[in-house]
Amino acid sequence: MTTPGAIGDICGKTVLVTGASSGIGLSACEALAERGARLIMVGRSPDKTEAAAARVRDRTPDASVEVELCDLARLDDIRALGRRLRARLDHLDVLLNNAGAMHTTRKETADGFEMTYGVNHLGYFLPTLALLPLLEAAPAARIVNVASDAHRAAKLDLDDLQMDRRGYSSWTAYGTSKLLNILFTRELARRLEGTAITANSLHPGVVKTGFAHNDPGWMSAAWKLFSVFQISAASGAETSVYLCADPSVVGVSGRYFAKCRERAPRSTATRDDDALRLWELSASQVGLPAEGLPVPA
């Protein structure tokens, strides 16, 4: 029996990681490369993503590492990424949706969505659907969504997901986006029933990374002060790697994990009606039908 935290054989499998240029995304890439995965590292910045890929190659010289550039705050970028990968790959074994951010002030994406919602939620929703044909072509694919226990403090308002009516709060926006990650995973797993694809979400821990440094000010300073209590990026990546590779979670879907063990999320993250309505709203926002598992053009 495989013990929690043990890593299975992922050698030769193709794994795509978003937010791969730093933090737990980069640490997950390093760990997966050491185990022989064929990596596709997705990032927004050419310089940072290439530097991250070089770091992975330096650590594992025989690693297969590719770089794909995509700004998850731009829906057209995500659609273009899907088209490029569907044209050149025959399958994808693992999708690790890891990218995320917190902003001290309200900002909008290129498509007019509140930035935290746009990147942390739609930046999971649309890439997953764009890459679904490649996941369906794999023998047994996995979708892993990095959420957070920050969802426990969130109060879901499906009529105000972008905080247009409420005053903007960075913590509220972030916590809500992590709740949406879990609800999305739940509905995705339901729609994937009967296929060879699983979908799970996770809490990585409170990780010492560049998180919350997107904007200068009090939050960045407070996060730095709090860093003494935070875990390393490598430790924060352990549950992601576990869900990407461990044989003990074969066939497990729609669950929430922390420290490489299943954990119950807050009850607000288990409401099927909310998960379905979130899916329908998200599909409408990115121009897709709400039925089934549509693939963006």
Image (tube, rainbow, N blue to C red):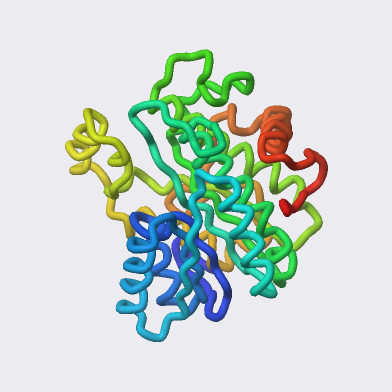
* Near-viewer residue (47 or 61): 47
The percent coordinates of residue 199 (x first, y second) are 64, 53
Choose top left, top right, bottom left or bottom right for residue 272: top right
**Compared to 113, does 252 lie above or below?**
below
Figure quadrant of the N terminus: bottom right
**Compared to 229, does 21 lie above or below?**
below
In the picture provided, is 158 more to the left or to the right than 46? right
* Near-viewer residue (77 or 219): 77
Residue 213 appearing in the image: yes
Choose top left, top right, bottom left or bottom right for residue 195: bottom right
Figure quadrant of the C terminus: bottom right
Identify the residue at horizontal 59%, vertical 64% (top origin).
94
Q: How many numbered badges does the structure rendering display?
A: 0
Residue 4 appearing in the image: no
Identify the residue at horizontal 36%, vertical 78% (top origin).
57
The percent coordinates of residue 17 (x first, y second) are 49, 61
Identify the residue at horizontal 40%, vertical 41% (top origin).
101
The percent coordinates of residue 97 (x first, y second) are 53, 53
Choose top left, top right, bottom left or bottom right for residue 47: bottom left
The percent coordinates of residue 31 (x first, y second) are 40, 69
**Compared to 285, does 80 lie above or below?**
below
